[in-house]
Amino acid sequence: MPGAATRFARVKNPPFEYHRPGSLGEAVTLLAELGDDAKILAGGQSLLPVMALRLGAPPHIIDICGLTELAEITLGSDCVTIGATVRHRTAEMSDTISRHAPLVAAALPHVGHRAIRTRGTVVGSIAHADPAAEMPAVCLATGATMVARSAGEEREIAAADFFESYLTTALHDNEILTHVRFPAWSPTAGAAVVEISRRHGDYALVGLACTVDVIDGAITSAALSFFGVSGTAVRVTEAEKSLVGKPPDDAAFAAAADIVTTTLEPGGDVHATANYRRHIAGVLTRRGLAEAAAKTGVPA
Ligand SMILES: Cc1cc2nc3c(=O)[nH]c(=O)nc-3n(C[C@H](O)[C@H](O)[C@H](O)COP(=O)(O)OP(=O)(O)OC[C@H]3O[C@@H](n4cnc5c(N)ncnc54)[C@H](O)[C@@H]3O)c2cc1C
């Protein structure tokens, strides 16, 4: 007769060996030994459901939650850095994030429910790379840099090269994503995250993380990063370019929305057809740009 713990493991997660390293050095050494037999556990808000649903059964789990060296949000001269064990909720409450990384701040309330944000991590969400998640789109829109560490080296990966396809990133099996750096925010820029989901807290059917920078009444740059439309978040650069030099008004936003609806090629599934997603992407373009423009130059 198996013990209660064994029975629980069979009903819920497949059995695994649990490791709780005391330092980042220990964690990357373990990862080097175990290779793709191991998975990093951060907040567990995606990994544990994946295991419970038997979509994955890693024999080893390396829990990095106790690594206080990765628990910081730091403001540098040219970036804001978020460490791998910073929870969504900690970032949501952070004055540094709201002032210096407003697109991250705008995205956070959309990530699941508060209970999920209290456990889940910002960096875990980026490493997980769900195409309907907010944070990968924010990384793409802002040109964030990922910092990955293995036992042998540390390397930096640009957001544009990091997200490869559905739940797949450029991270190697022996690497931990230790930090994400968001570039310094322009004081003349505004940010918005808008999305349509079936219920509040659900993943978006279609979402948009956008920024718009306005100087002397004209748009100098814009970023339109859509999520929930493809295997990764996608930027629609033609629509972004169409905004430059124009005043931030309805006509400019409608023209950008038209480009989005003709350029974007979303997929259809049981939740929404491709046509519905394309239409919503246009609606969100107008809505998101108007919201971002209204915040330009407004201190957070
Ligand atoms: C009901 C529900 C609703 C949700 N809704 C949303 C939503 O609307 N939007 C959204 O964005 N998310 C949503 N989530 C997911 C949530 O945001 C997770 O917190 C997030 O996706 C993963 O973060 P985590 O820290 O929990 O990572 P974990 O679940 O611990 O890990 C996820 C994956 O990333 C890997 N990983 C984690 N950290 C690292 C690292 N530092 N280095 C290398 N690999 C790493 C793990 O090995 C695993 O493969 C939802 C979750 C639930 C349960």
Image: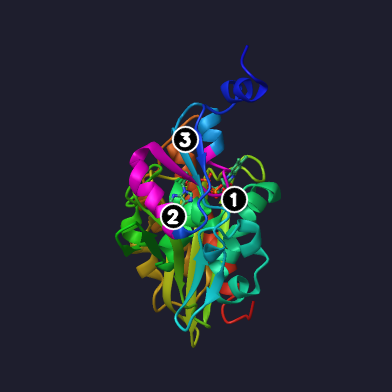
The residue at label 2 has a CB less than 8 Å from ligand 1: no
Pick whichever, 257 or 193, lies toward us: 193
Q: From the viewer's perspective, tell me whether residue 159 is left or right of residue 128.
A: left
Task: Say what amino acid the circle numbered 3 marks.
Answer: Thr
Q: Residue at x 65, y 47 (%)?
A: 116
Which amino acid, mark 2? Answer: Glu
Residue nearest the observer in this picture, 186 or 194: 186
The residue tagged 1 is 120
Q: Which of marks 2 and 1 is nearer the N terminus?
A: 2
Q: Which quadrant would the N terminus be assigned to in this image?
A: top right
The CB of the residue at mark 1 lies under 8 Å from ligand 1? yes
Q: Give the mark toward the camera: 3 or 1.
A: 1
* Residue on which disc 2 sits: 26
Q: Does the magenta stretch include residue 76?
A: no
Extreme residue in the bottom direction: 216
Q: Does the magenta stretch include residue 46?
A: yes
Magenta stretch? 25-47
Cα separation between marks 2 and 1: 22 Å
Is disc 3 placed on a helix, strand or loop?
Answer: loop
Q: Which is more foreground, mark 2 or mark 3?
A: 2
Q: Where in the figure is residue 33, as x and y percent of width and height?
A: 34, 45
Q: Earlier in the sequence, mark 3 or mark 1?
A: 1
- Any part of residue 94 in sight: yes
- Can the viewer see residue 256? no
Depth check, front residue: 56 or 199: 56
Q: Circle 3 sits on which residue? A: 273
